[in-house]
Amino acid sequence: MKKKGSILLLSLLLLLTTACSNTSGTKESKKGENNSVSVESKDPFAPLPEKVTINLAKSEGDINLNLPVGDTLTDNAWTRLIEEKLQADLNYVWTVKAGDPYTQKLKLSIASNDIPDMFLVGFDEYLELVHNGMIEDLTEAYKGYASDGLKDLYTSDGGKALETMEVDGKLYGLSSMGTIDNNTPMVWVRQDWLDKLNLEAPTTLEQLKKVTKAFIEQDPDGNGKNDTVGIPGQSNFFNADMLSFDAVFNKNKSFPGFWVKNENGDVVYGSTTPETKEALGTLRAMYAEGLLDKEFGAKKSDQAAQLIASNKSGIFFGSWWAGWWPLTDSVKNDPNAVWRAYTLKDSEDGTYYAKQERPIGNILVVKKGFSNPEAAVKLLNWQVRMQYEDQSIDPYNDANPPVHDNALPIYIGLWRADEVLKLHELVVKIAAGETVDETTYDGPAYLIEDAKKVAEQWKQGEEWLSQNSDKYGEPFSRVIGVQPLVAEKNKERVYSEFYGKTKTMERKWVNLTKLEDTAFMQIVLGNKPLDYFDQFVEEWNKQGGSQITEEVREQLK
């Protein structure tokens, strides 16, 4: 099984569902009947009281599972172990390709009321199933049967994942986890250029402008040519995780694409707030001054990254994991490049508004009427135990190459949401020669092994890493990239208030998004005056935004 120490690759596939049949554990549910288990604490690892068949379905990715000869996606050592521990038969009634084929199959199942016993869904499908009364309330099953290990994962984000999944105070599913501070934007800057030009680190907007102007005009690379440029960006310049201008928006307490509370406590769309207008005005002025790459509006992210890779730009906005990309290419082309990250705020003692990614991914749900809804919780208990708590029970623990997690009965991304921050702290300690005692460490013990490997690379020194760029990405990102996020004491994490989809959104969101993208770009490029923002907001509301806002508020009640 792959360790979960590396959190960079966080995108999850919709993978596991089930279809009911006459042999499943589903029973008739009378109107008003409550199939929930008692809230009293139960044995989280005990088998089910009697043998039950759980009908499952699964999506197939285009990946090599590295299974031994004889084992398959739906019949392997992991599935057999779970069957033994739960006293259950896992019956995979269909498998389809991941992505659209899976999504379409799932939609047909929901439409025909022929859903599986247990399956994974996205958040929109989750809300639909709850609204239609098609899935079990798992509130009591989770309270009664969740293991300490599973609870530890779900509390590592302050309970944000569970809170997001709650509908009318009830929990109808168990989700994969997001990662705290994973896509939080910072200012990345060539520290060697700062030192050469005797400039302060750009932690405020005014410092950022001063540094960018100097990098453009004062030949920081010393090649005697006027060939350095301003801050690179991509055409999708907001609500993106790398090479966007989100840091400028967020500094201004603006969160386009998010649903946020205004000063009156009402939920509004973040792209329509006065703070967003002000941030657009800032970007418009920076573009007019030549501080932003003049061609950003026509570039994709990989094209913008070329300015970093070629070291024509020494400043950009990005997440903690920039060491993997685009900075590996930068040091490969110039091993003398020294990069550092800084948080951007209104003032030195101001608040750092840290935009957060969605705290949940895919969600495991249980068909309404299934005889043992606690089986879903127990199944995850065992998977967490194998992955994190006692890898000696993992039948593939010593497999080389490791067996891919898609071969698990339910492939759902469960990890500590604060894993990036925890791993950073461990790497720094171990690299400094400190000993970490597994018996007293207050985090997950499995991280210690991962941290030791990264610390060994970091101890080689930054110069060595730059000269061996294929080793650069992980140790640099986990130490230098995460350090500002850990050190920042005046930080406010910001989540969207709403992640679902309303009825009007289904019909009008595509056009509203186009309206927004066009208006923002035209304002920043100077093709429209800043006050055009007010016209955009008016049009956004007229074309469905006002109705959507009301629907969002209604759903949040």
Image (cartoon, rainbow, N blue to C red):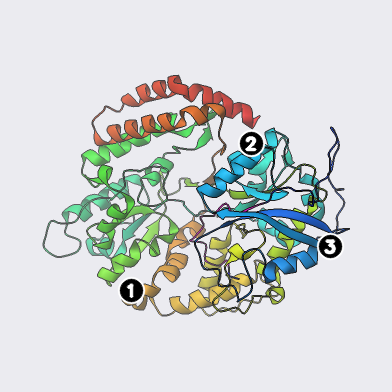
Q: Which of 74 and 285 is in front in this view?
A: 74
Q: Tell me the kind of residue under disc 2.
A: Ala
Q: What residue type is labelled 3?
A: Pro
Above or below for 326 versus 129: below
> Can you tell which mark lies on residue 47?
3
Q: Is residue 160 visible?
A: yes
> Residue at coordinates 69% horizontally, 59% vertically from top-left?
152
Q: Residue furthest left?
A: 224
Q: Residue at left 53%, top 62%?
A: 420
Q: Can residue 448 be found in the magenta stretch? A: no
> Which segment did they paint magenta?
4-17
Dot 1 alpha-carbon crowd within 10 angstroms: few under 14, some 14 to 19, many 20 or more: many
Residue for badge 2: 111
Local secondary structure at mark 3: loop
Does label 3 or label 1 sit earlier along the sequence?
Answer: 3
Whole-Å distance between the Cαs marked 2 and 3? 33 Å
Residue 466 tag number: 1
